[in-house]
Amino acid sequence: MEKLQQTIIEEGVALSDTVLKVDKFLNHQIDPQLMQEIGKEFVKRFKNKKITKIVTLESSGIAPAVMAGLILDVPVVFARKKKSLTLKDGLITSTVYSYTKQETNDISISKKFLSEDDHVLIIDDFLANGQAALALIDIVEKTNAKVTGIGIVIEKAFQDGGDILRSKGYQIESLARIKSLENETIEFINEKEYAK
Amino acid sequence: MEKLQQTIIEEGVALSDTVLKVDKFLNHQIDPQLMQEIGKEFVKRFKNKKITKIVTLESSGIAPAVMAGLILDVPVVFARKKKSLTLKDGLITSTVYSYTKQETNDISISKKFLSEDDHVLIIDDFLANGQAALALIDIVEKTNAKVTGIGIVIEKAFQDGGDILRSKGYQIESLARIKSLENETIEFINEKEYAK
């Protein structure tokens, strides 16, 4: 997605060989127009698939997920990283280790929001080692809902999450695929190389 | 806002005299169409005010804030409840005690996203005792940005946050104002009673 790649080049910062900071438009400050474009692109990439619900992870997945949900007219459910007092029972939980934050989180979704009749598009901001996506898939499949596909805003293609998920047969659509962050330089995998 | 009140009546649950569960459309599962209507309503209520940025708090404030930001074409910044490794320096922080979750959180915003030239609309999902809104105001004013107003999706008008904020002179626009949750019954303050 060209506009996204441009924004990453202009406003993203390669903090290290593995960390890309995109807090100017996605992870802390959000660019609503760009989120709308991202939502449209996800809808386009999964246009032949049945989708009854979108599942994402708080907090940075919410904006792109809600924009896609608005176009598809389906509800969005965001997995929570911590249990709150008003969400006690009936949770389906999975565990995620975040290499960036160096911590393990339980993420959970109330089981009443997913059923075996659901066809779920999973949307997340980043795909790196695949831990978050695998946990979201785990939660969705525990409810016997089907995973229709996985939409990722930014894939760090030099990490192995993309390979792990693709080898399991899921349709993964990453709107920007980072080849390398070495030497403080953001390099993309040429999208055309990977077009279907 | 009538559609919001209807949704609260149909899908909200009064868990106790003080806790309203709205996880079917706002706090866990999100209704994107309703979020868009809420965004439009906020824009209408602050239509004569200058707004250069929207500030909200993760996670449930993000969807309504992004919808308002899309219409106004301004960036949205969400305050984080925890520091992450990629967001270390240059944070402006304030403290919030959550009565619902019975815990104290530091919330923070990177100072580079707010300046004295900004006119900030604060948006949040709930207003109860006002702790979160006061912390967001504190952060915005520490950067010398101006608080244009505060948009709240649901105000628990039987708690004192609304009075505290209004007594400080801020324009508060709450799209649904709950008078009481007693006897498992959701009662609204008649909006017309409070129309300006």
Image (cartoon, coloured by chain):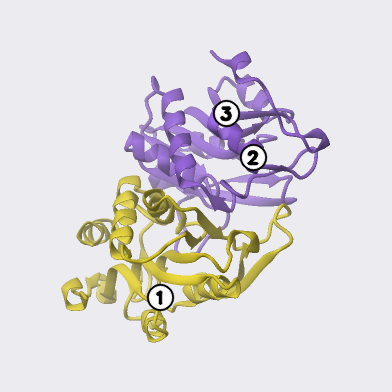
Chain colours: A purple, B yellow
Q: Disc 3 designates what residue?
A: A174
How far from the left and from the top, in percent, is residue B57? 51, 62
**Disc 3 and disc 1 in contact, CB within 8 angstroms:** no
Can you tell which quarter of the image residue A94 is in? top right
**Residue at x 46% of width, y 29% of height:** A41
Comparing B5 with B14, the one in front is B5
- Viewer-proximal residue among B40 and B95: B40
Q: Which residue, as the protein is rendered here, is positioned at the far front?
A: B117
Chain identifier of the residue bearing label 2 in the image: A
Image vertical order of residue A23 relative to residue A123, above or below: below
Residue B155, position as x, y percentages in the image:
34, 71
- Horizontal side of residue B38 vs A87, given as left or right: left
In the rendered image, which residue does mark 2 sit on?
A10
x, y percent for residue B83: 68, 60
The image's mark for residue B128 is 1
Q: Which secondary structure, mark 3?
A: strand
Q: Tell me the subunit letter for badge 3.
A: A
Q: Secondary structure at mark 1?
A: loop
Q: Chain of mark 1?
A: B
Q: Marks 1 and 2, how far apart in space?
A: 40 Å
Which label lies toward us, 2 or 3? 2
Residue B191 seen: yes
- Amino acid at pointer 2: Glu
